[in-house]
Image (cartoon, grey):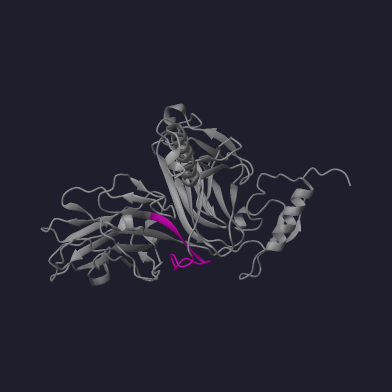
Amino acid sequence: MAISHCSASTKLAWILALLLILVTTTIQVHCQSPPGFISIDCGFTNTSAYNDSITGIQFDPDSRFVEGGLSNKISAEFIAGSDEQQKTLRSFPNGSRNCYTLPSTTGTKYMLRATFTYGNYDGLNKTRDGSLFLFGLHIGVNFWEAVNMTNWDPSSTIWKEIITVAPANSVSVCLINFGSGTPFVSALELRPLQDLMYPFVNTSVSISYFRRIRFGAATDFITRFSLDPYDRFWEGWPFTYPWIPLNTSSRVRRLPGDNTFQVPEGILQGATTLDTNYSFLEISVGVGPNLDAKNLQLLPIFHFAEINSSNPSRRFDIYSNDELLFADFSPSRFQADSMHQNGRFLHNPTATFRLSKTRRSRLPPLINAFELYSLVRMDNLTTDSDDVNYIKEVTKHYNLARINWNGDPCSPREYSWEGLTCDYSKSNQNPRIVAVNLSTSGLKGG
């Protein structure tokens, strides 16, 4: 009754106030990063964080995650059209190893992504001058992958991802100078995963992104957060005849309790098949210049769901190059099937996979999504944690700032800190610091 007796102007004021509250609430929800997300805009010089205009994810400046390096901006000619995080970068002209340290929870599984946009920030056109432009990445104390910018479009972005288990309360990402170009990085993104996801990843095995593809008709080249709550990058797959996209608005469900990969339903609702006159579908992703094809070990994960509204027979064999992985497979109707060989890594120098129609199948093969990873061995052990704490206290107390005192003090051995003597005699135990030589550190006083 009270509302019915309000004047028109009073009603309008209440409505405007309510709309303002709703808009404010919507903006706050949109701009709030999911729990555990750490997003770093490398080289960003502002002191405050900002929210990405597309995803709403909060990005922080990198100053509290790294020591050393130089902040840079890409060339003005490449600014327009670049993502916000790709407009700045941090380069490391000094030192053989420079590391970012990101807070984490010990034993938690994470996806870590690093992006690189050169953008001719130094005016030297290093990606186009014909010389080798190559530097390395370490995850903790283990080699992850090389970043090869040779003959690369300076406006394009390279990204690297790794799924790994945090060994302690921090995860370090190190850029390694090979002497063939100054290492740099544009952005770092750390995303926590559920413990049950990617069960073959553990403290001794990590996996590096090779390709992650969504099939069917997609409007964006990259699909990520918020469709994927873990912010994985899913690339669209270009198709021409005889490839045919399929899409459905019907629900595509996972089996109850199946949390192994958690492919978003919006991705599983799309698929690619072939004209019925064709019998096999081949996925060839190619081996890039960063990897040794002869020794490459790949782990493919195939995601299927039959989204054809009719119910004719569809059966096919799944091959890695010429090796039969799964025979006479038939995808379930509107239910996700994720096929992999329990973490078995395959030798496939050409990175080619084939789905071949069987004789009793009435339809050609179909696929909804595909993930491919390479093996990263986590064989190197970190320095004893007590010794690390002690040497950090020494560094802080004496205000030491040596260029190569970055990352783990003793591991890997070829990047151990200058002036330290480390004991590696026990192969199955963490290396220990047994002596510290500070004679060239310029110490004065008592």
How many marks can you see? 0
Percent position of residue 320, x then y: 29, 64
- Magenta stretch, overall SS: loop
Corner quadrant of residue 310: bottom left
Percent position of residue 303, x then y: 31, 62
Q: Is residue 279 left or right of residue 132?
A: left
Percent position of residue 81, x then y: 40, 33
Q: Is residue 22 left or right of residue 432?
A: left
Q: Is residue 204 magenta?
A: yes
**Compared with residue 139, is residue 154 higher up or lower down, i.e. above or below?**
above
Visible in this render: residue 205? yes
Q: Is residue 169 left or right of residue 277?
A: right
The one of 200 and 289 positioned closer to us in this rendering: 200
| Residue under the image location 36 percent in, 66 percent down | 346
> Which residues fall within the magenta stretch?
195-210
The one of 302 and 441 positioned closer to us in this rendering: 302
| Residue under the image location 28 percent in, 58 percent down | 368
**Compared with residue 253, is residue 29 higher up or lower down, i.e. above or below?**
above
| Placement of the N terminus among the 4 image quadrants | top left
| Residue under the image location 65 percent in, 47 percent down | 404
